[in-house]
Image (tube, helix red, strand yellow):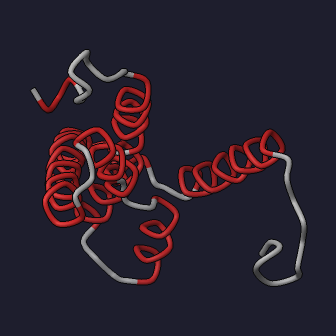
Amino acid sequence: MGQDGIGNIHFDNAEMTQVIGYAALVVILAEGGLGTKWKEIRPALPASSVLALVGVAVSVGVTATAAHLLVGLEWRQALIIGAVVSSTDAAAVFSVLRKIPLPSRVTGTLEAESGFNDAPVVILVVSFSTVGPSSTGTCCWAR
């Protein structure tokens, strides 16, 4: 939707877009969280926490390296791109897991991981976005 999409809606209020986006995120995550059974997730907490952290780190690393080497982005830009695309969509995971019969331990691990991986991604995106370049013009991670 938008001025170049369906409905030809002209919209130029960035603050309102941010508020609507946050509200949608809260609804999506709350719906997924309310539909999750604690007894399925509790045994999976350690594994899902490790998977979330390691998965995010590997995804950021692979995507950032590809963006740097294949597209030619500077490391800082490549890391931001890697961080933005590294998190799994919790709403999509919850939706798929409700339709596919899997063992409860696997379901619990995947649901918890998809919920936990958002926090490190937010931290990485904010960190990569706010740290300025060094005096040589290259980002602090490229030294």
Residue 117: quarter of image: top left
At horizontal 37% and vertical 59% (from top left) the residue drawn is: 88
Residue 109: quarter of image: bottom left
Place of residue 139 in the rendered image (x, y in percent of width and height, measured from the top left): 24, 29
Residue 86 vs 98, above or below: the answer is above
At horizontal 48% and vertical 70% (from top left) the residue drawn is: 92
At horizontal 40% and vertical 73% (from top left) the residue drawn is: 97
Decide if residue 18 is on the left or right side of residue 116.
right
Q: Is residue 44 visible?
A: no
Place of residue 25 in the rendered image (x, y in percent of width and height, measured from the top left): 63, 50
Query: Which quadrant of the figure contains the N terminus?
Result: bottom right
Place of residue 112 in the rendered image (x, y in percent of width and height, measured from the top left): 35, 50
Decide if residue 80 is on the left or right side of residue 11.
left
At horizontal 69% and vertical 52% (from top left) the residue drawn is: 27
User: Nearest the camera: 100 or 84?
Assistant: 84
Decide if residue 1 is on the left or right side of residue 78.
right
Residue 5 vs 110, above or below: the answer is below
Residue that lies at the very extreme toward the top in this rendered image: 135
Decide if residue 113 is on the left or right side of residue 72.
right
Query: Which quadrant of the figure contains the C terminus?
Result: top left
